Amino acid sequence: MKVFSPPWRPPGWRPTRATLQRLPLGLTLLTTAAFLLVPALLMGRFPRPRAIGLEKLMATVSLLQSFRADPDRPVPEIWKERFGPESADKLWRYQSRLWWQFWDGHADGPPFLALSSRGLPEPLSPGVAVPPLTVGDLSIFPPDRLSRQILQDRLQPQVRSSPGVRLRCLPRMESEQAVFWRPAALGVLLGPLASFLQGFQEGCLSLTIGGDGLLWRGEAASVEGMVLRVPEGLLGAPELPVVPPPSPDVLLEAQGPSLERLMAGLLARELIRQPLAERYGLGPTQLTLLRQTPFRLVLRPRDQGPFQASIELTLVTGLKQAQWKEWLERLADRLRKEDLRLLSPAARPGVSQPPPPPAGSKRAAVWPQALWQRADGVVVGGWRWHGSQVGGDQITLFLGPPPSVPTRFVPSPVVNKGGMLLLARPQQLEDRGLLPGALPQVVKRSDWLWMAAEPFPGLGPEAPLNQLQGTLRLRP
């Protein structure tokens, strides 16, 4: 057997280009593969530091926002607070990457500032009163030393791959202007209104400035940390439809296929269910009926009288007229015990008189319409039934003065798909003190907004995940 031995080379010999060209093909391929595979294995073993930093923040903080750097815009206030006016101006002019701000815990204190560590000067400006905290490739600038220590204690040393919404939100937070929230943020921003948004506990939105307003699209889940795969082709929300602003006499309008999604948070509390049953006759049977009913909720401004606004709730009763009539008759008995007086049909201007009650009936006067008055003569509410020959019966319950022009509820295409639609005039609501105080100023100063929440196609209307899209129009 012939044993291969390399040829003898003199001392100091170096391979020439011709020699390299004569190397065996297998050796060349093996060397090339090594150059390609080793970096790939290292990248898989040690992923990007910034992604790890954002994942840690998303698992801990209550609200996280990403912003595009734009040196042509004014220096953000949070930069001035963390670096001082002069240093903030210098850093801002040379900033070219995304930056983030977030709230730890309950989102009711001053925010944290997060920047990519790459490109920051070393050492930092003496205007930085609190030393930054390093998380992956992020430098975190806390508002004070106590907040820094609390965040450092809360950050987990190791974070598993983000499930569900967080997994899909991470690329948004790394590449575009976006916002991510967890349940604690909803409680602070919305206050008592958070109970009506139980289906949006954790979510992520991409934000785009276009025309005279702000556009957003994304998703929200009813359970924090829920793992639910979405087909790749469904991640992009459909084109934003053209939605006209609400009429001038509407402060807020909400539509949905069922009151269950709106009332689930409230009805889960015994403290709410008990008085509803005792004072208003809304027991389990009636609540089940309410939960299955398509609705439209309207808030209208009132410039005169004791109320700032009136509330109208229109429900599609369909063929269940007898069940609704039975409940309203029991409700009328309870309202009489609350010293409310039922106005006679002749005393109701602009209201058509109901058909004459059957002989001997004492309760027929509350159907199909009723108007209730306090002892001081102020009308506090009532209801009105709208019949239909095709079974599309509706009933409108109202608090405050009766609706001047009764209109039938025609569900929007979003509602027909099993989704919810919200239209509002935030500036007018804020003028009347009807908005939660912690809402961002950009929302409070907006002229009007709309938001649609629809189930992802193929997941079914009961899936605990919705795609969100909407527009907020800013005042000039």
Image (tube, rainbow, N blue to C red):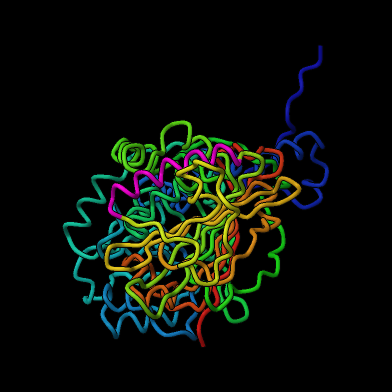
Please name the residue shown 45% across and 62% down the image: 311
Q: Residue at the left extreme?
A: 146
Image coordinates of residue 397 in percent, x first then y, are 49, 55
**Left or right for 229, reference 223:** right
Residue 78 makes an appearance in the image: yes
Our reading of the magenta stretch's main secondary structure is helix
The quadrant of the picture occupied by the N terminus is: top right
Which range is magenta? 321-339
Quarter where residue 108 is shown: bottom left
Residue 219 x %, y %: 56, 51
Which one is nearer the viewer's eye here, 200 or 349? 349
Residue 330 covered by magenta stretch: yes
Q: Seen in the image, is 34 located left or right of residue 389?
A: left
In this picture, residue 36 sits left or right of residue 420 = right
- Percent x, y for residue 316? 62, 48
Pick whichever, 385 or 111, lies toward us.
Answer: 385
- Tell which residue pokes out farthest to the bottom in this image: 476
Give the residue drawn at x 37%, y 67%.
435
Q: Position of residue 364 (x, y in %)?
A: 51, 46
Q: Nearer the viewer, residue 95 or 339?
A: 339
Any part of residue 171 in sight: no
Disc tally is 0
Position of 283 relative to 13 (above/below): above
Find the residue positioned furthest to the front: 359
Q: Is residue 183 magenta?
A: no
Q: Nearer the viewer, residue 151 or 453?
A: 453
Q: Quadrant of residue 27?
A: top right
